[in-house]
Amino acid sequence: MEAPAAARNPAETELTVTSPEQMRDLGRRLAELLRAGDLVMLSGELGAGKTTLTRGLGEGLGVRGAVTSPTFVIARVHPSLRGGPPLVHVDAYRLGGGLDEMEDLDLDVSLPESVIVVEWGEGKVEELTEERLQVRIHRAVGDTTDEVRRVTVTGLGHRWASADLSGLAA
Ligand SMILES: Nc1ncnc2c1ncn2[C@@H]1O[C@H](COP(=O)(O)OP(=O)(O)OP(=O)(O)O)[C@@H](O)[C@H]1O
Ligand SMILES: [Mg+2]
């Protein structure tokens, strides 16, 4: 039996991704939903595919420069090549738990004009905005190829309350 509409969470979707290429494609589809002011929080263990997803996102947004795992840089700005919002890619892995270093990045200043994607941002970026898209990536249990990922996308706050995320599964 189908749950009543009110009981369903319209801003959450779960999908399975079976290769890095598919993860990149998911990033491209995700980009279509994003606009300036959006914050995307990516979680998942080391090597889960957060940067791979962000690469597709950058392609979908049409920004300059390849998205990589920064060695020394914590935040990198990729300007749009077509008049859209820049992508700010943050890898907070090396940031301490405190909010001070995070504040030095002035993400609150850039957020209104940018799409900000943060890896390892839990406990660090939540105070930027209550409206955010959370993407959780998990390795599938028992996957011998180590290429299968379960991805849960959840929209939080007013911005995502009526968003239709079902198209991400395409
Ligand atoms: N389904 C998949 N989706 C994404 N990456 C995959 C998948 N299957 C295998 N991989 C591989 O896993 C690795 C993911 O690396 P990636 O840098 O994207 O992870 P990450 O979550 O950003 O890691 P880190 O926490 O170190 O930043 C890549 O080598 C990629 O080729
Ligand atoms: Mg990464």
Image (cartoon, grey):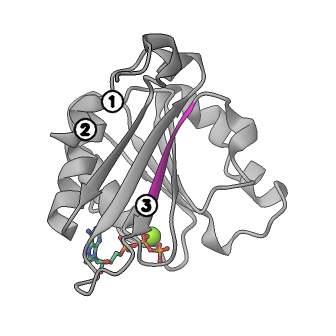
* Residue 64 shows in the view: no
Q: Are circles 1 and 2 on residues that touch, CB within 8 Å? A: yes
C-alpha gap between disc 1 and disc 2: 6 Å
Q: Report the residue at 56% width, 34% height from top.
A: 132
Q: In the image, is 23 to the left or to the right of 2? A: left
Q: Considering only vertical position in the picture, is 94 above or below 115?
A: below
Residue for badge 1? 165
User: Mark on residue 168?
Assistant: 2
Q: Kindly indicate the quadrant of the structure image that contains residue 102.
A: bottom right
Whether ligand 1 has any atom under 8 Å from the Cβ at mark 3 is answered as: yes
Q: Kindly indicate the quadrant of the structure image that contains residue 24.
A: bottom left
Q: Are circles 3 and 2 on residues that touch, CB within 8 Å? A: no
Which is nearer the N-term, disc 3 or disc 1? 3
C-alpha gap between disc 3 and disc 1: 16 Å
Q: Which residues are magenta?
A: 132-137
- Under mark 3, the amino acid is Ile
- Under mark 2, the amino acid is Leu
Check residue 39 for magenta coloring.
no
Residue for badge 3? 137
Q: Residues within 10 Å of mark 3 (few under 14, many from 20)?
A: many
Q: Are circles 3 and 1 on residues that touch, CB within 8 Å? A: no
The location of residue 28, given as percent across then percent down, is: 21, 45
